[in-house]
Image: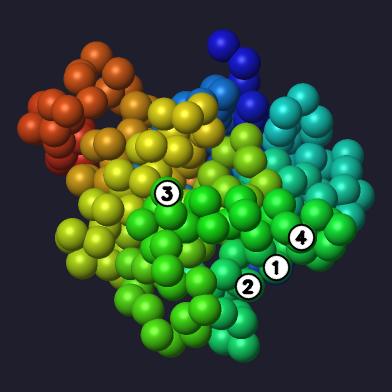
């Protein structure tokens, strides 16, 4: 199976002098094409830092990250930016949408900046994604005129505009109620079934139980991993039991 991300002995430090410490301590990970990975761990364990280094959003102080065959440390900043924009999608706990743009314009902004001549096709694609994610009809709404779950769906639409190899999510359901959260997870599962890889940072066992590969991180190290591919995707009870049991075993 093709590997889209290979992280080898990643080290990431913060602070200076005597206050310098490693957020990541020699972490090695691999993510395959079309794989659904969840990363769990206590606050300050390095979950989000790992996501940022694997996506090239943050540089590494040791080791290396290979994305789609390219060593991210060898790329110039513009090359990195282009790779993130064209091959990666990002969804955060709080959607980073612009207040002066409506929902549709927020979704298409980056794509329009890249290719204004193709505006008709870009708008059509955005509207198709809005229909697919259940927010059709909200194109002209301001971001203050929709719910948190609808905003998150708009963020997912924006992340999908470039047909990314992978979507990175940092607590994407963390600010939503349980019904909205599961709606978002259903969308992610559908995206993944279509061949897009997912890496979600989460503290929620219900979210992690829907992944096929879970990494547990603590003190900047991967301390355990489990795979749920042995369970049917609809066997939620068994998947949840596997995740919660492992969390108890390793104390997170």
Q: CA distance from mark 1 to mark 3?
A: 19 Å
Look at the numbered disc 3 and give the secondary structure of its residue.
Answer: helix
Give the mark nearest the N terminus, 4 or 1: 1
Q: Work out how far the residue at label 4 is from the one at label 1, CA to CA, in angstroms.
A: 10 Å
Position of 72 compared to 226: left or right? Answer: right
Point out the tag, 3 or 4, that comes first from the N-terminus. 4
Q: Nearer the viewer, mark 4 or mark 1?
A: 4
Which of the two residues, 6 or 113, is positioned nearer the viewer here?
Answer: 113
Q: What residue is pinned by disc 2?
A: 105
Of residues 103 and 84, the one drawn nearer to the viewer in this rendering = 103
Image position of 193 (left or right of 49): left
Residue annotated with mark 4: 119
Left/right of residue 110 with respect to residue 152 in the rendered view = right
Numbered badge on residue 132: 3
Sequence-wise, which precedes: disc 2 or disc 3? 2
Crowd class of label 1 (few under 14; some 14 to 19; many from 20; radius 10 Å): some
Q: Which mark is residue 186?
A: none
Mark 2 closeness class: few <14, some 14–19, many ≥20 residues within 10 Å: many
The answer for how far apart the CA atoms under marks 2 and 1 are is 6 Å
Q: Are marks 2 and 3 in contact (CB under 8 Å)?
A: no
Question: Which residue matches tag 1?
Answer: 109
Circles 2, 1 touching at the beta carbon (< 8 Å): yes
Picture residue at 63% right of the left edge, 41% below the top = 164
Q: Is residue 160 visible?
A: yes
């Amino acid at each position: 199976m093709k590997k889209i991300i290979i992280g080898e002995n990643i080290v990431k430090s913060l602070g200076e002098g005597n206050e310098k410490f490693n957020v990541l301590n020699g972490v090695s990970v691999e993510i395959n094409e079309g794989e659904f990975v969840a990363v769990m761990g206590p606050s300050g364990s390095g979950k989000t830092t790992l996501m940022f280094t694997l996506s090239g959003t943050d540089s590494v102080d040791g080791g290396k990250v290979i994305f789609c065959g390219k060593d991210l440390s060898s790329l110039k900043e513009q090359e990195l930016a282009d790779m993130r924009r064209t091959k990666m999608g990002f969804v955060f706990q709080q959607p980073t949408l612009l207040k002066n743009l409506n929902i549709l314009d927020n979704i298409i902004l980056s794509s329009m900046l890249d290719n204004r001549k193709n505006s008709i096709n870009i708008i059509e694609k955005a509207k198709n994604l809005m229909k697919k994610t259940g927010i059709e009809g909200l194109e002209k709404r301001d971001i203050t005129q929709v719910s948190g779950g609808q905003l998150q769906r708009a963020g997912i639409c924006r992340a999908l505009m470039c047909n990314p190899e992978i979507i990175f999510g940092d607590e994407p359901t963390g600010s939503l109620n349980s019904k909205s959260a599961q709606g978002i997870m259903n969308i992610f599962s559908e995206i993944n079934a279509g061949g897009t890889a997912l890496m979600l940072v989460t503290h929620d066992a219900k979210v992690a139980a829907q992944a096929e590969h879970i990494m547990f991180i603590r003190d900047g190290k991967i301390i355990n991993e489990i795979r749920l591919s042995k369970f049917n995707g609809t066997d939620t009870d068994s998947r949840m039991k596997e995740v919660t049991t492992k969390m108890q075993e390793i104390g997170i």
